[in-house]
């Protein structure tokens, strides 16, 4: 979400919205499950801005891709990330098998990763995994109970990938940017 702050001019206008006092305009892009990006513009008074920011604390604790420290890639495209986590891409460019680690489906971190990074709901990802696993086309990802477990398993497994909050990163794993 990008926050665009208005000033205290008597009449602010942005995208057809007007505000007669101090107010804040914010825009954010959302991606519904059918794949179209939509832009939403809203106008909020200062007293409600604090409430909105408190409700969006999850932005501060965003998930980031974590890979084994031997992984030489500098970044991944969002389409590659989707292919890896949907189990359609099973080898890194150097031929190393990809081992995917995820949190349990009910974990808040897993829900956030699915929605904010992959752009789908967790149940949709689970359905994709089920189709591939039951047809014998791909292995299931490894489900873990905590981010600490995920960090340890990624550190121990060459070719592995998962996701962590920024606070969970240490020298044993590497953050991989998504472009």
Image (cartoon, rainbow, N blue to C red):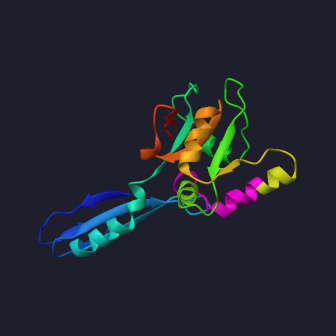
In percent of width and height, residue 59 lies at 41, 57
- Residue 78 in view, yes or no: no
Secondary structure mostly seen in the magenta stretch: helix
Q: 133 left or right of 91?
A: right
Quarter-wise, where is residue 40 in the image?
bottom left
Instruction: Compare residues 100 and 91 and report the one nearer the observer.
Output: 100
Is residue 119 located in the magenta-colored stretch of the structure? Answer: yes
Q: Is residue 115 above or below residue 42?
A: above
Q: Is residue 33 above or below residue 145?
A: below
Is residue 95 located in the magenta-colored stretch of the structure? Answer: no
Q: Is residue 170 above or below residue 28?
A: above
Please tell me which residue is depicted at 63% across the width and 50% down the height of the picture: 102
Instruction: Compare residues 69 and 65 and report the one nearer the observer.
Output: 69
What stretch of residues is rendered in magenta?
Answer: 116-129
Instruction: Compare residues 38 and 100 and report the one nearer the observer.
Output: 100
Q: Is residue 10 above or below residue 106?
A: below
In percent of width and height, residue 15 lies at 32, 66
* Residue farthest toward the right in the current orientation of the protein: 135
Quarter-wise, where is residue 9 in the image?
bottom left
Instruction: Compare residues 134 and 8 and report the one nearer the observer.
Output: 134
In percent of width and height, residue 178 lies at 51, 40
Q: 51 left or right of 155?
A: left
Task: For the N terminus, give its image quadrant.
Answer: bottom left
């Amino acid at each position: 979400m990008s926050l665009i702050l208005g000033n205290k001019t008597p009449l602010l206008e942005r995208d057809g919205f007007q505000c007669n006092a101090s107010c804040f305009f914010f825009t954010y892009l959302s991606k519904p499950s059918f794949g179209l990006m939509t832009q939403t513009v809203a106008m909020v008074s200062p007293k409600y801005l604090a409430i909105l920011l408190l409700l969006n604390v999850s932005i501060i604790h965003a998930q980031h891709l974590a890979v084994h420290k031997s992984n030489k890639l500098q970044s991944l495209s969002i389409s590659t990330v989707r292919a890896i986590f949907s189990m359609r891409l099973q080898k890194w460019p150097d031929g190393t098998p990809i081992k995917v680690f995820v949190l349990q489906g009910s974990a808040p971190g897993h829900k956030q990763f699915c929605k904010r990074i992959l752009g789908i709901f967790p149940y949709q990802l689970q359905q994709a995994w089920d189709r591939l696993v039951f047809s014998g086309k791909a292995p299931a990802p490894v489900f873990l109970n905590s981010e600490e477990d995920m960090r340890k398993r990624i550190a121990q497994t060459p070719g592995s990938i998962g996701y962590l909050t920024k606070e969970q990163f240490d020298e044993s794993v590497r953050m991989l940017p998504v472009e």
